Amino acid sequence: MNSFRAAALAAATVLGATSAHAQVSTPATPRVGSPVAGPEYGPPAPNIAPSAPTIAPRVGPLPSDLTLAQALDEAEARAPALLAAQARVDAAQARIRQAGFRSNPELSVEVENFLGTGELSGLRQTEATVSLNQRLDVSGRRRTRVAAARALLVADQIRLAIARADLALAVRQQFARAVTARDRLRIAEENEFNARELARVSGILVQEGREPPLRGIRARSAAAQAAAELEAARAEELAARGTLASLFGVTTPPDRIAGGLTDLQPASIDPEQSLDVRLAEAERAAAEAEVGSQVAQGRLDPAVGIGVRHVRETGDFALVGGLTMPLQIFDRNQGNVSAAQSNVRAAEANLANVSATVRVRSQNAIIAVEAAEARVQALEGSAVPEAGEALRLAQLSYGEGRATLLELLDAQNAYRTAQLALIEARLALANATAELGRVAAQ
């Protein structure tokens, strides 16, 4: 028995020295199993370190006074969308490691001529065979499989970069909306205070007979309307902070929004280097790599096996071996090859479509930024200052009795409208600049 074990170990050593892979039942009559990859020739298994453990998202409350820089940092540390994209990259790296492994050899044990009749009764004529079997990968299946997995990893890495860029775009745009809501609330508070004070003064003037009762009613109505607008502005500002917090996966919004609307400057764009075009190119490369993998799956790979046979009657041992070649009469993997080639054509069409879309998107972003800048400059340079000066003069004239209450109300409304228009223009500029930054991201 010890000699049988030694011979079996020797057979395993002989087969282990050949970098091959097969699935067979016995060396003499190999049974070819499902095609699996594992090249005898070609590059070794990829030396890729296991991916780092997933970093837990940041917890705890947001900063009380949240700036745009802090918002972008919080999004990077908390956003579930980035964690999901990073997990997909980790999965792609694991698939590369798996694609590079050789398949395990197969150990088979076969016992013949036992529990029969006559001379074959009992175990007197027993023959036992222990063998290791493996398939030779001479068609490059493992190499092409690794190449296809690497191409998918590149695509997932670009998708991670796109997820970051999309998240930054969403944070910048929602932060700008929150700043806009904050500024609207400030104007609503000022307007409500002025309207309430004007209603008080007009009430005194009506009692003294210096203003008709209709003017007092008009002033009180304007004050009530300003109070309603103030409540709406408060609700809008709170909702904007809540929506911003939701981008981080947080339900409790920050107490205040601090700072300006944007942190970007308009930059030049190379549409062909944009993330969307690069992803389309990576998807095309992955489709082409899959064609190579499917073609390799259809090639012929021999299966070999070697083992030790023990004849109980004589006590002798002998080596046995086998070689088989699958006959590709029916299945040559032609369907999968054709499907992979169709995927390449689809990826090429998608690349052309994405390239055209990115070029148009970049042109529109540039036009939007230029238009928003011109509008902001016009409002800041003349519209708002002139409306403010008109309000100052109306207040002086009303105090001196040379202007009516209606003229003062009209001046207040004109100034508030100009301020709100400037806020809207700055929001449009912030959104356009954020969109330009997203298109230009590489």
Image: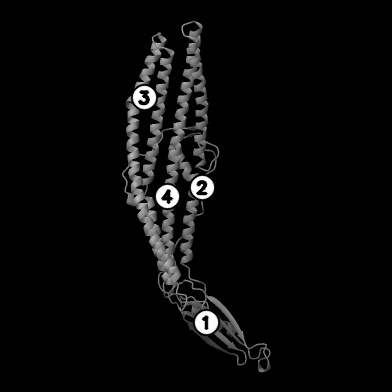
The answer to which of 260 and 409 lies nearer the viewer is 409
Q: Position of residue 305 (x, y in %)?
A: 50, 81
- Name the residue that disc number 3 marks: 384
Residue at 62%, 89% (x, y): give it.
Answer: 312
The answer to which of 413 and 307 lies nearer the viewer is 413
- Amino acid beneath label 4: Ile
Disc 1 versus disc 2: distance between alpha carbons?
51 Å
- Amino acid beneath label 1: Pro
In front: label 3 or label 2? 3
- Amino acid beneath label 3: Val
In front: label 3 or label 1? 3
- Name the residue that disc number 1 marks: 30
Q: Earlier in the sequence, mark 4 or mark 3?
A: 4
Residue at 52%, 22% (x, y): give it.
Answer: 227
Q: Earlier in the sequence, mark 4 or mark 1?
A: 1
Disc 3 versus disc 2: distance between alpha carbons?
42 Å
The answer to which of 303 and 127 lies nearer the viewer is 303
> Local crowd at mark 3 within 10 Å, few (<14), some, or many (≥20)?
many
Element on which disc 1 rests: loop
Q: Earlier in the sequence, mark 2 or mark 4?
A: 2
Element on which disc 2 rests: helix
Looking at the image, can residue 225 be seen? yes
Disc 4 versus disc 1: distance between alpha carbons?
50 Å
Q: Position of residue 237 (x, y in %)?
A: 50, 31
**Residue 80 shows which numbered tag?**
2
> Local crowd at mark 2 within 10 Å, few (<14), some, or many (≥20)?
some
Establish if 2 lies above or below 366. below
Element on which disc 4 rests: helix
Q: Earlier in the sequence, mark 3 or mark 1?
A: 1
Q: Earlier in the sequence, mark 3 or mark 2?
A: 2
